[in-house]
Image: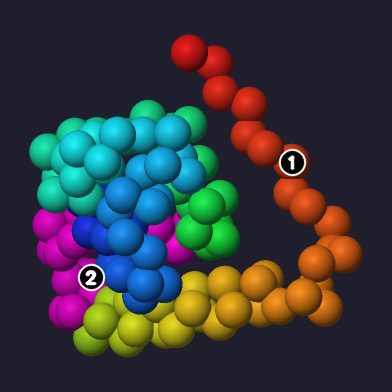
């Protein structure tokens, strides 16, 4: 499972640069690059922050990060069929959720509290 691959895919789908996302997440650009390329493993707190900035649930990142080797052998044929479709749908949903959240009419909607991270 490479958690960085879906982070990069969603970021690009939303037309956000690596530098912009890194700044909003209080990360260096090189740290985010390392996460996206699979060279660094993000903490749960970092994943929370990235998902918050991208306006997507963490579960989407985990679903998109699944790789064939993560799936039991007996279920890989089904995985090969459905996983590509799920990834496309997730990216479309992420794009629509972000557009919806940036709409001025939804500005008065309740704001999700910031996650608290222990370091």
Range of residues picked out in magenta: 58-80
Residue 82, percent from left and from top: 30, 83
| Disc 2 element | helix
The mark nearer the N terminus, 2 or 1, is 2
What residue appears at the point 80 percent right and 67 percent down from the top-left corner? 107
Q: Is the magenta stretch mostly helix, strand or loop?
A: helix
Q: Dot 1, crowdedness within 10 Å: few (<14), some or many (≥20)?
A: few
What residue appears at the point 31 percent right and 49 percent down from the top-left corner? 19
Determine which residue is flagged by label 1.
113
Q: Is residue 70 magenta?
A: yes
Residue 49, relative to residue 102: is it above or below? above
Return the residue nearer the eye: 68 or 107: 107
Visible residue check, residue 3: no
Residue 78, percent from left and from top: 24, 80
What residue appears at the point 19 percent right and 45 percent down from the top-left corner? 33
Determine which residue is flagged by label 2.
75
């Amino acid at each position: 499972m490479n958690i960085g691959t879906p982070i990069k895919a969603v970021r690009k789908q939303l037309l956000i640069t690596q530098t912009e996302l890194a700044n909003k997440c209080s990360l260096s650009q090189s740290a985010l690059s390392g996460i996206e390329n699979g060279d660094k493993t993000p903490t749960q707190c970092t994943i929370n922050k990235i998902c918050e900035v991208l306006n997507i649930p963490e579960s989407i990142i985990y679903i998109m990060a699944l790789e064939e080797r993560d799936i039991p052998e007996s279920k890989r044929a089904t995985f090969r069929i459905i996983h590509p479709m799920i990834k496309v749908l997730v990216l479309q949903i992420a794009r629509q959720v972000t557009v919806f959240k940036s709409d001025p009419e939804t500005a008065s909607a309740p704001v999700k509290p910031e996650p608290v991270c222990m370091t």
